[in-house]
Amino acid sequence: MGRSHETFGKKETRTKQEKKRKEKEKKRIERKENKSGSFEDMIAYVDEFGNITSTPPDPSLKKEINPEEIELGAARNTELNSEQLIRNGIVSFFDESKGFGFIKDLQNRQDVYVHANGLLEPIRENNKVTFELAKGPKGFYAVNVKISR
């Protein structure tokens, strides 16, 4: 009778693999047997805060949205009358070496680009300024910028 060619390590790994395969087969059979098959169990809902829930949303809280009112991309350029062109704001950023910056419009809280060519007097960050809006190729920018006293 000859000796076995398998070492203890080989036998050990083979038994581990066999055990793993049997456990996997057992789990597969359990999943098959416990399968409810109900589509309703698989449905998930998203609430108004973006959380996934199993309860459907309240129909009374539903809002009707007009698809034509949804703007994709940059805001459309609208024509402004002379009263709307003069604005007040605070300089949020200005780089004197490069000659440009941004003004935070106090009316609609948007940043408006400003270039050194549009200044009537030197400005710094956090200055309260009065400016006029001009329409450029990339949107509105500030011109005739002066410090409001």
Image (spheres, helix red, strand yellow):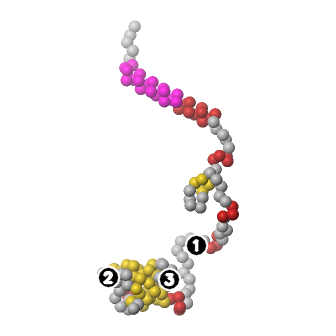
Q: Quadrant of the N terminus?
A: top left
Residue 71's place in the image compared with 41, above or below, is below
Q: Residue 5 placed where, x, y %?
A: 38, 17
Residue 47 located left or right of residue 103: right
Q: At label 1, which amino acid type do we have?
A: Glu
Q: Which residue is mark 2?
A: 96
Q: From mark 2 to mark 3, how far is it between C-alphas?
A: 25 Å
Query: Marks 3 and 2: in contact by CB < 8 Å?
Result: no
Q: Which residue: 56% across, 61% down?
A: 49
Which disc, if any, is residue 107? Answer: 3
Q: Residue 127 placed where, x, y %?
A: 37, 84
Which residue is at the far left? Answer: 97
Q: Which residue is mark 1?
A: 71
Choose mark 1 or mark 3, whichever is in front. Answer: 3
Which disc, if any, is residue 130? Answer: none
Q: Secondary structure at mark 1?
A: loop
Q: Secondary structure at mark 2?
A: loop
